[in-house]
Image (spheres, rainbow, N blue to C red):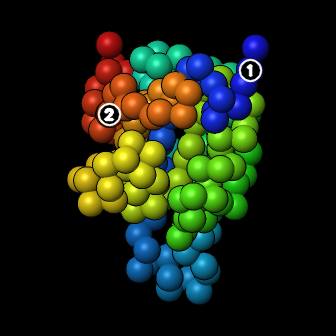
Amino acid sequence: KRTSLATSVKVKVIFFRHEPAGDRDEFAKSNRDDRDRPLTDPGIVETRKAAIALNRIANIGNSLVLTSPWTRAFQTAEILANECGGRVEICEGLIPPMCHSEFRRYIEGLNVEKLVIVGHNPDLSDFLASLLKTGTDSGISLNKAGAAIVQNKSGVYRMNAFFSRQVLIKSDRK
């Protein structure tokens, strides 16, 4: 049985920041919008490793993967969905700057058991901090390909785990 995040007994929410993209200044020389800046080739490989490890640790298979439409986030979401078995959905609410209250209302209206949110810093980390009620100056900061696992139990969010990219990638080797 799936229920909305707002009324759920227990829903797993995974926050995942996109992997490294190409150099911003170099990309700007191409006269293309920064939103189109893709992941680097090593970033694609590391995202795949992090996704496999995250799935093994947190069982994120069959998740709804919400992503910013920006290229690097969308690529990250596709890799997560492909490696873990999930469905990608573009969410305009993840475009910086995010409106935390609107995005929270949106996700709490979803009928899911597992939700992965892929986005950009500082917005993604600030939104995570707002859910945890720690304040945006809390020091919570997802690094690239870093993840946080949060449980929502009847509208109260608690962080269960926080992983850097390095920890996820090292755990994939085991």
Foreground residue among 43 and 67: 67
Q: Which residue is mark 2?
A: 163
Give how far across and how far down residue 34 sits, in percent.
Answer: 55, 75
Say which quadrant the C terminus sits in: top left
Residue 133 x %, y %: 37, 47
Query: Quick check: 123 left or right of 133?
Result: right
Which amino acid, by three-letter code, is at mark 2?
Phe
**Residue at 32%, 55% in the rendered image:** 135
Q: Is residue 80 in view? A: no
At horizontal 62% and vertical 54% (from top left) the residue drawn is: 103
| Mark carried by residue 2 | 1
Quarter of the figure with residue 136: bottom left
Residue 79 versus residue 62 in the image, above or below: below
Type of amino acid at the residue the image marks with label 1: Arg
Quick check: can you spot residue 140?
yes
Crowdedness of circle 1 by 10 Å Cα count: few (<14), some, many (20+)?
Answer: few
**Is the N terminus in the top left, top right, bottom left or bottom right quadrant?**
top right
Question: Considering depth in this image, is 6 or 136 the residue closer to the camera?
Answer: 6
The residue nearer to you, when weighing 20 against 1, is: 1
Q: How many marks?
A: 2
Residue situated in front as seen by the camera: 10 or 118: 10
Q: Residues within 10 Å of mark 2 (few under 14, many from 20)?
A: some
Q: Secondary structure at mark 1?
A: loop
